[in-house]
Structures are given as structure tokens and as C-alpha cells.
Amino acid sequence: MSKSSLKQTLKDLDTKKISIRELNQDYLKRIKEKENLNVFIHFSEENVLKQVDNLEKDNSTKKLKGIPIAIKDLFCTKSMPTTAASKILENFNPTYESFVTQKLLDEGSIFVGKTNLDEFAMGSATNTSFFGNTINPLSKDNKPLAPGGSSGGSAAAVAADLCLGATGTDTGGSIRQPASFCGVVGIKPTYGLCSRWGIAAFASSLDQAGIFSHNVEDASILLQSIAGFDQRDSTSAKVDIPNYFEKLDDDLNGKTVGIPKEYSIDGTPMEINQIWEDAIKVLEKKGVKIKNISLPHTKYALPTYYIIAPAEASSNLARYDGVKYGFRSDEINSLDDMYENTRAQGFGREVKRRILIGTYVLSAGYYDAYYLKAQKVRKLIANDFNEAFKECDFIVTPTAPSAAFPLNEKQNDPIKMYLNDVFTVPASLAGLPGISIPFGKDKNNLPLGIQILGKHFDEQQVFNAAISLERSYE
Amino acid sequence: MNNLVKGEKHDWEMVIGLEIHAQVKSNSKLFSSSSTKFGSLPNSQVSLVDAAMPGMLPVINKYCVEQAVKTGVGLNAKINNYSVFDRKNYFYADLPQGYQISQYKYPIVGEGKVTIDFKDGTSKDIRIVRLHLEQDAGKSLHDQNPSKTYVDLNRSGVALMEIVSEPDIRTPDEAGMYISKIRSILMYLDTCDGNMQEGSLRADVNISVRKPGEEYGTRCEIKNLNSIKFIKQAINYEAKRQIEILESGGSIEQNTMLFNTSTGKTRPMRNKEEAHDYRYFPDPDLLPLEISEEEIGKIKSSIPELPDELKNRFIETYKLSNYDASVLTAEKQTSDYFNETINSDSELKNHAKIVVNWITSELFSLLNKNNLDLNNSPVSPENLGQLIKLISTNEISGKIAKDVLEDMFSSGKTARQIVDEKGLQQVTDQDEIAKVIDEVIAENPKMVEQYLAGKDKLLGFFVGQAMKLTKGKANPKILNDILKSKLK
């Protein structure tokens, strides 16, 4: 069976071509077949069928009624445990539902399970999870590939057709990079579009929920469902959420695309520069004006990100102390012991590394040189985009500097791993919306992603450019 | 005034600054909607935010912000249009987030000042450095189980105002007066209930000593004192300790101290090297706090008359002394009581000093004796006013009035009732008094002889005898006059 889109499935459900039960049984079957990919941290057939039962009794019309959705295990959910892929939350059962997942439940969607991720979303390969690696469904010949990260489980779930859409979070590229690696669509909206309430925090000023889907149309439907103002999140934006899907328009005639020269980086594989050029050519043919732009502070984005994100993380993760919930070490002789052993045993290496970096850059005597300077650079980077967007309507770049790499390739080289975020991090620092869509293959037939960035809260333009490219590529 | 402390070798001056933590009077916490009620069952007022569950976010309680602005205005301070919440990071069992949300670089309120008044009529300004908003921590309960510590998070997230003074205080008494004054202002504003016993108001004291005229010495900080008595004790002990060290050739280590309320001594909690690095940084979960001039103006216009304004008005309207007026305005309930009393009869405005005396000496001492405070005084302002009116119109004597007040206090009757029932009206009839005096003169011929021979002091004896016969009701002035004329 070829992958069915969300849009088509909604039609089929509407015309009774398929029932909610049949639809979900189909997905359940595939989920069980693909257990070897280690996509889910939590999966329960019984729980899925219970949701089907409930929806069958429900006569109301709902936008996503019966649609199987996978949830990144960073979103707190009442019906399933929430671990953040960490031992420290191994048996944590929230009594509350995150804003984003509640919206999806209100629309009638069915949660098939909680997907794997890098521990607390810290990683680019879904290989720092306490629950093991997720394998990219596109892997061949016993050579397992990484799905990207941190939302690798969600990207893989969509790629392996284990759901019709999945939630992710993106702090520095955690939706866009795995979307690129797994050959699916992934959108990170503007910071503030989706409430962070109920998402275990990694870096509060950067974390943003988003969507994985099979195609741009589906992403536009799902994003509308999870967006919206929430008074429980002070950084949530009071903006009207348009019906992105209805307003999709692939006619880009007269628009201007910005091509930032700083994204041509030595060492980027030829194929990636090739698909970038292809995309530009396609846009040109569609009557889009090509504008070479400069984002001069781009080269500082990665170091800036790897100061700010760990700094916030070091503080956000202080609450996991063994006192109130989650894992607590048995080896306790004093309060300090409890903290040290709980956190030493409860967190993995990457999380500890980032807590250490974050603690260091905030400490007395280093704060000005690191954290404060990084904040200043962050403003410059955001300003680069503001200036650039005076001359163009959207920006096109590659999503990642490589295709999916073998599973354990960069395991022991954090710097190499961090370089994966080079194209995604600047927009994160500026809080801008970005989408990754599959746009070509490398020599091993692995998918490569193109990234489209838009102005603040101009998701519609991002979708329009994306669907235009998508349609030309199909 | 000599503010110096005598050491073994020379005189020393104390240099004191206070950090007052005042709990904001508000029904809900600073960043959550949980109740702030005192004395509830442990962990019965804890929201998901207060317990720092994963993914929970703080949302500022606007009422607490208004309360802080109000307080800032009351402290004659600059209100900052822009302020920022920072995270103060440290681990403790009763700090669920692993950080306290506070304000570091950009507090909501800047420089201000308060005035303290001395008995001799002089006064002094104590400068305020800043006021900022922050969250309180929970409570660790160490006494519930021999081997365990329990944590109660009811207080976790409750809003505090930290009010920091300049080191302008020089004596333990000034420290006490300063905290009393702050407490008074907060209670007038209704921004803090001022209850020190329940911990709604507590202070950290920074203290150093120096030889007069020299630079500031190294200071120590005494943490978490919750009564004025303890603050004074702790300062006295700590100053003595520092002076002894310095006079024996030692130097002061910059320590954080704890005060033991049963021994009256301070002891070090941690030294400078052990001091926390709190790694302050702006809380990314919260936007900077912006308050427009318009909002500040609105809050300003809602502010009631404050103790200093009231004091000046009392001095001007009623010709009271600075000290009397400051005693009267130190507590809102006192000035309210005074206002109600003096306004209960238009006559009383001309006898303000008598009203002050009857409230602050006679009524206060009765209340003290009975362990009551003004709010639950059995004598209402109207009734006290009636009593004072009876004195000022010479209907009863001051001496009798004291008995009447005691009666009012215990029986709840009005002054009028008691005076009428017991027939306590002053005797002002000249003939009646003259008759009594004649009787006294007739009964004491020897005394009269001595008096006439020059023993003037005996006049009191005759007054006393005459008063005894009238059961104290004779008007003393008339009695005196007649007695003097008869004994010529």
C-alpha cells in the first residue's frame, strides 16, 4: 500500500470508504511490523483501540477525527507516560495534557504512541535516548542510518508510514534536520505560535513545537490545529491563525526569494549545493525574482546557539533533582548525595555535557564573556534577517550539510554532531518559521531537504513556497 | 546624640543595612493561581507550576505587580517602567524549580527613602536602594521524623518584595525604628499584612563596625530575623563579636551568619568562599515587565494617606508635637482610632492633646494588661470620645474618668451610662463645696493652725480630706480656690 496523505484519508473517512477502526488497525499493523526501528518509547495497542472505541461513540464532527498521530515524547500526555527519553523521567505519568496535544485531542485525533528523541531533545541523531537509537526507515543492507534528531522518532514514524502526522519540537533544527534525513516534511513555526505549556523544556527561548507530515498540504492542516494563543505561556503570541490549507497558493509570480551567500560553506557535499541550485532554478521559472542576500553574522550562529541553549538547559533541568517526581538514586547519605547521585545516574552523557557547558557560561566571571556576548550576537543575527526580509519574501537554503549518516558515526565527536545544525540554527535564534521539504537525493539515493524560511508569523508564505517547490519536484 | 559603642580600647560605630522580605498581600501566588492562605494543610496549595512539573510555565500575577508599584510609591521611590525577572539558580529541597525567580539587574522599584522619628523630636532619612519582586521557597520540615525531611510547598511561589536599604542605620534602635516604619507604610498601603510572627515580614541584617570617620569595615550578614527584638539582639551581639575580634588584632571574615534565638548568639553559616554562585540570567519563560506612566499614575491615585502625610496633617490640624503625631501614625489602627475618636464630637477637635493622651496612655495600658490590641478594643472610638467630652466639659474629673474607662472596658457600657448610674458627676456647686470645706476645717483645728503658721504643704491634706468627703467628685479647681480663700 502506498502512503496515503492526511488530506486523502480525511476524504476517505468522510465518504466512509474506510472506517476509523480500519484505518487505525492498518497503522497498528505497520507499527508492530516496524518495531525494529525503535520509533516509539511508548506504544500500546490497547490504548489506541480504546481511543478508537471512544471516537466511534462520539457523533460530533471533528477536524482530525480518527487520524493517527505520533507524539514526540517531550509533550506531556495524560494517557501515556512522558519520559523526554531520559532515565530521570522513566516512570513519569503527567496528570496534565500539553497545550499542543490537547488541541490535537480536541480535533479528534488518535495518539498512536510517544516517539523516541534525543534525551531532553539534546542531539542531532536520536542516539542520546535512554531508550536506544531510532533507526532511519530508509536504511538499507544492514547499514542502519540515523534518522536525525532530536525529533528522530517522529520523523521516522512519518517516513515509515506509522502515522499520518507527528508532533516535534525544534530548538536548533530538531524538526527540520530529521525531516531532511527521513525524506518527510517538517515545519518549525515562528517562536510563540504554539504554546510551550506542557512540553518538557530544553531551551525556553528557542523551543518551538511543530509538525512532521508526508507533504506540505498535510503540514498546513496540522499546524493550524496546534497553533494558537495560550495565556499559560507568557511567550505565546496573540496572533490570528489563518486557515493555511485553504489559503495555499503555489503561484509565486512576482515574489522575491533571498539566497544567502553565507550558506555556501566549504565542505558541503556537491549534491546538496546542486539541489539548492535546482530549487532556485525552479523558482526562477515560476517568476520568482532571485535576490542574493547577505546574513553577515551567520558564522557566529552555531557558537551563539551552543552557549544560549545549554545555559537555559542547565537551569531548566535543575528541577530534575529526585525530590518531587521521577528517578531518585538509592545511594543517599545526604541531600547533596541525593542530588549528585540522582543526576549522575539519571542523565546521559550529552545532557550532562550541556548542563556543564551551560553552568560554566553562566558562572561569575564568565557570564559577560559568554552568555551576555551570545545574547548580543543573537540580536545581530536576528537583525540580519530583518534587514534581508526588507528585500525578499522568503529565503531558501539547504536544510542540513549532509544526508542521513550511519547510526554511530558522530557518536564520539560532539563538535561534528553540532555542525549538523549549521543551516537551521540561525533561524531558531531569530525565532523565524522554517520548513524542510524533500527535494532530491544524494548518490546513495538518500533524501535531501531544502529549507524555506519566512518572516515572523508568515507561515503562509513559507507553505506557499514549499508547495510550489513540492509540486514542481513531484 | 552619641551612637558609638564603647570597646575595650576605643569607640566604635555600627554600620547597618537591612534587606526586608515582605510577603505581598495577594490571594494568589506570584506566578500561579494557588492560594496564599497561611496555616493550611501541608501541600494543599500547590499548583503544577509551584511543584515545577515538567513543561510548566510561570505567568505573572498582575495584582502582585501593582502591589509592588504601590509600595514603591509609598517608599518615595522611583518606579521603573522596565524591569526583568531573572533566575537565581541553586539547589535546595524546598526550591522545586532549582531556581528562584527574582529580579537582579532591573528591579521594579529603584531608589527611595523613609524617615524615622526620634523621641527628642529629631528625625533621620534612611535611603532605599531598591525593591524587587521574587518568589518565596517552600519549607523543609526537619522535625516530623527522626531520619527524614519533609517538604511543604504551600509557600513555594508566594510573592515577596525585597526592600534593600543603604547602610544608613547606626544603632540597633534605628534598625528597629526603620523596620517598624517600613511595616507601618506597608500596612497603610495594604500591600503586606505585616505579621512578623507568621513570617510575612522578615529581615536579613548586614552589619560592620568601624572607628568613627573611617572607611566601612568588612560586613557580616545575619539571615532571616523575624522580630524587632531579635534584630536588635542580633545586632548587639554581632557588633560586640566584631569589636572583640578587631580589638584583639584580628580581622572580620565576610560571613553569612545565623542567629540563635534561644542563646542570643550569632554563628557562621557559610563564608565567602562557600558563597553560592547563583548564575543569574533573565528568565526566558517571562517577558520583561513593562509598566506605562499611565498605569503608574492610576496606581498612585489609588494610594491612601500614608503615615508621614498623616503625621504632618495631624501636626498642622491639631497642633500636636512631632513625636505625638508619629506615635499616633505608626500603626494604621492607631491613627484610624484617633480619627474616629476626634471626629465623634466637634468639641473634641480643641482637645486633641487630651485625646492623644487618653488613647496612647490610658487605653493602651488597659489593652496591654488584657493582651488585646486596638482592633478588638472593648471601648469604641465613639465611647472614648464621649468620655473625653465629659472631662473637657468638667462633668467628671480626670481622676474619676480613669475609673469610668476601666468600667467601660469591662462592662461595655458607655461613659454616660456609668456616670449617670453611679452619680459620678463632678460637684461644681460652690455652696456645696464650701460646706464640705467648712466641715474639714472644723474637724482639723491643729492642722489649720500649722498651715496658717506657714506649713503650706498641708493644703494637699485639706484637698484630700474634702475629696474624700465628696467621693472624689468635687471640681478640683473650685475646691482649691475656696479652700485657699477660707484659710487666709
Image: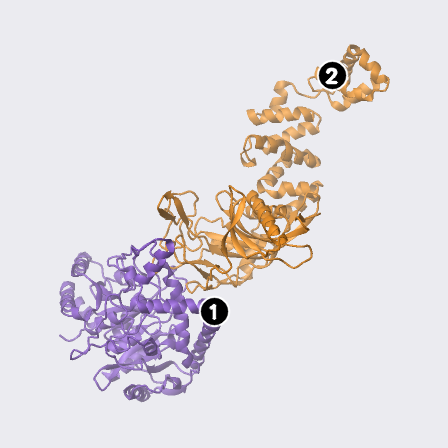
Q: Which amino acid does label 2 sit on?
A: Gln
- Relative to B175, say whether A416 is above or below: below
What residue do we see at 66% from left, 36% from top? B356
User: Where residue B378 sits: x, y (%)?
Assistant: 55, 30
Would residue A118 be seen by someone viewing this image from the given angle? yes
Q: Which amino acid does label 1 sit on?
A: Tyr
Residue A131 falls in which quadrant of the image? bottom left
- Label 1: how many residues lie within 10 Å, few (<14), some (14-19) or many (20+)? some
Chain under callout 2: B
Q: Which of marks 2 and 1 is in front?
A: 1
User: Where residue A26 sits: x, y (%)?
Assistant: 14, 67
User: Where residue A82 sits: x, y (%)?
Assistant: 27, 60
Q: Name the residue beneath numbered marker 1.
A: A367
Instruction: Kindly state the secondary structure of the residue where label 1 is placed.
Output: loop
Q: Nearer the viewer, residue B388 or B157?
A: B157
- Label 2: how many residues lie within 10 Å, few (<14), some (14-19) or many (20+)? some
Instruction: Kindly state the secondary structure of the residue where label 2 is placed.
Output: helix
Name of the residue lying farthest toward the front: B248
Q: Name the residue beneath numbered marker 2.
A: B465
Q: On the picture, is B26 further left or further right than A140?
A: right
Q: Which of A348 and A24 is in front in this view?
A: A348
Q: Chain A is drawn in which colour?
A: purple
